[in-house]
Amino acid sequence: MAEKVVVKAQTRDSRGKNDSRRLRRDGMIPVSVYGGGKDNMAVTVALSDLAAILRSESGQNTVFEIDVEGNGKHDVMFADRQIDPLKGRMIHADLVRVAKGQKFEMVVPIILVGKAVGMSTEGASLNQILRELKIFAEPSKAPEVIEVDCSALDVNGSLTVADLPSKDFEVSAAPDTVIATITVSKRVATPTPAGETPAAG
C-alpha cells in the first residue's frame, strides 16, 4: 500500500479578498475543511501540494492527511475546488474529513481492455460511449480505474453498466447504460451514369 500523503496547513484567521490574493501571490490557497462530526476549519495550504495530489493516479479521489498546525491531523479528500477561469489555476478547495466505513460519491475513469472479436470485421469501429462513471464507495475500496473486458464484444453488440465486473461500490447509472459498441461503416458507391466510363483511380 502506498504511503499516505501528508500536507501541512495553517489556520486562517482573516478571510477577505485582499487576504486571499496575498495568499495566492505567496503560493498558498484558502481551504475549507469540514465533516466527520467536527467543527469546520478555515486553513491555508500550499497550492503545489494540492496540485500534486490531483496529478496523481487517484486524483481527486485520493485520501490524504492534512496536518493543521495546532489542530492535529485529519484524513481528508477533495469535495470541491474552484478554478480561476482565466489562469486555469486552483484558487480554493473544499476538503471533507473521511471516517472509516463512510462512503462518498466519486468519478472514476473507464478503460476498455482486450481485443473485441467484432474488430476483425472489415470497417468495424469500437466506440466508447461512457468514459467515466460516478460511483458511491468507501475511498479505501474505490478503484483508481474501472477496467472492462471487451473481448466478447461483436458487431452491433454493446457493453453496458450491467457488464461491469464484481465491485465494492455502487453506481448511479442504470444497468442498461451503454459503455461501448462496435459499428461497421460501409462505403456507398456512387452510381455511374449510363454510357460513361468510371474515372481511373
Image (tube, rainbow, N blue to C red):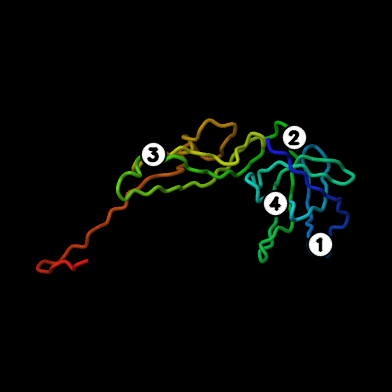
User: Callout 2, which amino acid?
Assistant: Ala
Marks 4 and 2, how far apart at CA:
23 Å
Give the residue number, with chain letter if any, for mark 3: 153
Label disc, if present, on residue 52 of the rendered structure: 4
| Residue at image coords 66%, 62% | 88
Are dots 4 and 2 in contact, CB under 8 Å?
Answer: no
Q: Is mark 3 on a helix, strand or loop?
A: loop
Are dots 3 and 2 in contact, CB under 8 Å?
Answer: no
Are dots 1 and 3 in contact, CB under 8 Å?
Answer: no
| Residue at image coords 60%, 38% | 143
Are dots 4 and 3 in contact, CB under 8 Å?
Answer: no
Vertical order, 177 against 188 (above or below) = above
Q: Which of marks 1 and 4 is nearer the N terminus?
A: 1
Residue 151, percent across and down? 41, 37
Give the residue number, with chain letter if any, for mark 2: 99
Q: Earlier in the sequence, mark 1 or mark 3?
A: 1
In this view, the residue in front, 134 or 62, is 62
User: Callout 3, which amino acid?
Assistant: Leu
Marks 3 and 2, how far apart at CA:
40 Å
Q: How many labels does the image show?
A: 4
Q: Residues within 10 Å of mark 4 (few under 14, many from 20)?
A: few
Label disc, if present, on residue 26 of the rendered structure: 1
Nearer the observer: mark 1 or 2; the answer is: 1
Vertical order, 140 against 195 (above or below) = above
| Residue at image coords 78%, 52% | 31
